[in-house]
Amino acid sequence: RMNAAYLPTVEHLTGIALLYRGPAAPMDWRLLTSLQEQTGIVHVNLDHLGRPVHAYGIWMGLSEEDTEQQIKEAVDFIDDHSPATFGGDFNAKMGSPVTDAVEAAGFIDPFTALGIDPAPPTSPAIQPKSRIDFVWLRGLLPSEAWVSESLASDHRMVVVEVELP
């Protein structure tokens, strides 16, 4: 059974949805500093066989000025919670200041960890050319990672199966 934690943004017209398996869990969230469209980060503390697993979903702005501030706020919000997943639309490519900050916070890219190179592109959903959507892991081991061919969104969905070490 799938559940969702949803943080509405931009007058409830858009938002961040964090989908997860298992029973409904309490969520918390933070709106991120945004000069353009309002963005945010949502958090759910899941219970897996009595062990906590933190899941975070984010949607980041389009401008570098926004994203550099937003990733600092997001990493501060996540703090040292582990094990954790951190996924969403980062509007940044690998090797950017945004992804470098995520890696500096101790997260790994499951595609890299699994030796999948190059990782599949995610944007746009139709004929994707760029990889700007990620699911990062900290304190978890990826067992599988792929990008869905679904056209349910403007970007393709990143799917990662994980194991607790």
Image: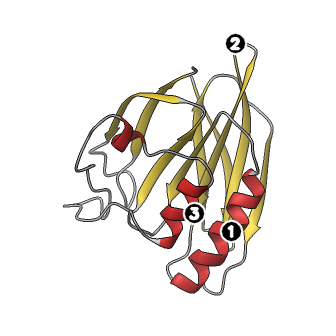
Viewer-nearest of discs 2 and 3:
3
Residue 5, x across and y down, in percent: 68, 44
CA neighbours of label 3 inside 10 A, class few (<14), some (14 to 19), many (20+): some
Q: Amino acid at mark 2?
A: Leu
Give the residue furthest to the left: 127
Q: CA distance from mark 1 to mark 2?
A: 32 Å
Left or right of 162? Residue 65 is right
Q: Amino acid at mark 3?
A: Ala
Left or right of 145? Residue 50 is right
Tell me the quarter of the picture where residue 138 sits.
top right
Whether residue 97 is situated above or below residue 135 in the rendered picture: below
Q: Residue at x 41, y 40 (%)?
A: 110
Q: Earlier in the sequence, mark 2 or mark 3?
A: 2
On the image, numbered disc 3 is attached to which residue?
A: 101
On the image, numbered disc 1 is attached to which residue?
A: 72
CA neighbours of label 1 inside 10 A, class few (<14), some (14 to 19), many (20+): some
Q: Amino acid at mark 1?
A: Lys
At mark 3, the secondary structure is helix
Q: How is the image coloured?
A: secondary structure
Asked if the residue under mark 3 is in contact with the one under mark 1, i.e. CB atoms within 8 Å, the reply is yes
At mark 2, the secondary structure is loop
Q: Residue at x 56, y 30 (%)?
A: 140
CA neighbours of label 2 inside 10 A, class few (<14), some (14 to 19), many (20+): few
Whether residue 27 is situated above or below residue 139 in the rendered picture: below
